[in-house]
Amino acid sequence: MKRFTVMAVVCVAPMMCLAQDFAGRWDITVADQGQTKAWWLELDPGAGAGRFVGAPDGWKDDVHDLAVQDGALHFTVQWENRPPLIGVFTARLVNGNLTGDFTLPGKPKLTWTGKRSPAIADKDDGTWKEGKPIQLFNGKDLTGWEPEHAPEVHMPPPPADPAEWGWSAQDNLLETRGRGTSLGTKARFWNFALHLEFRVGPRGNSGVGLRGRYEVQIMDDAARPLTGHSTGSVYSHIAPTVNAAKPAGEWQTYDIRLVGRQVTVVLNGTKLCEKADIAGLTSMAIDANEDQPGPLVLQGDHGQVDFRNIVLTPLSK
């Protein structure tokens, strides 16, 4: 069980007003080794509470020790390693945005900026029309794909040579043994319906990044209890209603529809969520620009997984 301690925000009117300036949802961009990574933060300083998605584990973790002192926001996030790993965050408001830093024990300090999560008006209201389906994988090579950075901090950029990406493409299969980069489409997409088939290996763990920001989880977890990280979840944000996953080694299908922030996920013909609102970025996010089109990303560094028949159908008015 996670420890949860909170430093009370001083209950003086000016200070409380300042604390509330930090309240809400924030999309964070962090620079690390020439790459940018994306995190997510939700704060309620008045209640001394918050949630964070980002380095190093990517779960939605509680914020601890939340305080606003001398105009600066301070909080920590604790990850249950042995011994516990504690990240320390500090930030100030600059022209309505957050400018801050982040430290982990024994690691270089990182700087980050945060912008308020944008309002996205698009709703899956029945008015969206399907365009021409796009085959994202040609069945024979990696044309149309590029490597994406690892979401973890303090990791080097992905290799430029496709032979070092850790993926193979042949006989209509896109395969990785789980020691490669994540792959993203060069093309960017906004609202769409996606169909793909996947086969996960024993103890495998992968994911599908919608717009490169919202991960729909893939795991070898058939018949296991459901969590916010089960196959079919929008990682840490939306848990599936049933476990419809098949055992490792069997082919499975995803049919996913994304309009604005609303997502519908169907796994192996079973609907797991319908028009559910995604609260914010997941750990797989490659950038923090939630109001912009993004790539389809396939995670490739957590075990064996194969993909085929990857078809995306754009949706428009």
Image (cartoon, helix red, strand yellow):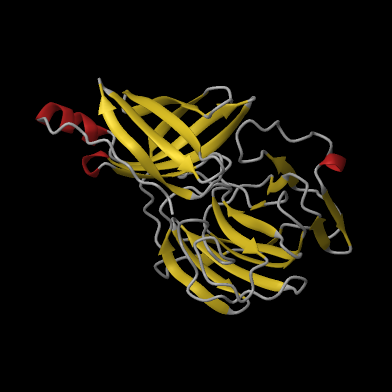
Decide: is 317 above or below 12: below
Decide: is 20 above or below 256: above
- Frontmost residue, 137 versus 207: 207
Say which residue appears at 40% left-offset and 41% top-offset.
41
Say which residue appears at 69% left-offset and 44% top-offset.
186
Side of 110 relative to 180 (left or right): left
The residue sitting at the front extreme is 83
- Frontmost residue, 173 versus 149: 149
Say which residue appears at 71% left-offset and 32% top-offset.
157
Side of 95 relative to 277 (left or right): left
Say which residue appears at 48% left-offset and 33% top-offset.
87
Side of 161 relative to 43 (left or right): right
Image position, residue 262 (x, y; %): 44, 61
User: Does the image show residue 132?
Assistant: no
The residue sitting at the top extreme is 70
Decide: is 186 above or below 275: above
Q: Tell me where residue 76 sits by quadrant.
A: top left
User: Does the image show residue 105?
Assistant: yes
